[in-house]
Amino acid sequence: MRALVYSALIMVLLMTPLVVKAQDPFSSFESAINELTQSIMNILNVLKESAISIGRVLAGTLIALGVVLWASDIFTYKGRKLILAGVLLLILMELIP
């Protein structure tokens, strides 16, 4: 009788973690998906910040080159177009959060 009680007690102790694990079988899968989603969001934020900084540098370059071309009367029309493109790009880069 005593052996039966001990074996039942051991079975209950061994089955308790299985019952707890069986209640939420997808918890590790869900946490892996959440970590992957967070990593993807971080990568996208880095890419966005890089694109914004590259756009600002490009806008400044376009404006400077346009001013040089416009002021030197070599390509006045193209200089005005470059200045306008640079200003529009700069405005667009400032509007992106």
Image: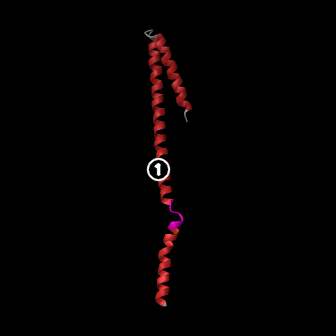
Q: Position of residue 5 (x, y in %)?
A: 50, 86
Quarter of the image with the C terminus in it: top right
Which residue is located at x 49 percent, y 90 percent?
1
**Local crowd at mark 1 within 10 Å, few (<14), some, or many (≥20)?**
few
Q: Position of residue 39 (x, y in %)?
A: 46, 47
Considering only vertical position in the picture, is 13 above or below 29?
Answer: below
Q: 47 or 26: nearer the eye?
A: 26
Residues in magenta, as a range: 21-26
Q: Which residue is mark 1?
A: 36
Residue 30 on the magenta span: no
Please, what secondary structure does the residue beneath circle 1 have? Answer: helix
Which residue is located at x 48 percent, y 37 percent?
49
Q: 42 or 9: nearer the eye?
A: 9
Callout count: 1
Q: Position of residue 55 (x, y in %)?
A: 47, 29
Q: How is the image coloured?
A: secondary structure
Which residue is located at x 48 percent, y 57 percent?
29
Quadrant in the picture for residue 64: top left
Considering only vertical position in the picture, is 84 above or below 15?
Answer: above
Quadrant in the picture for residue 73: top left
Amino acid of disc 1: Leu
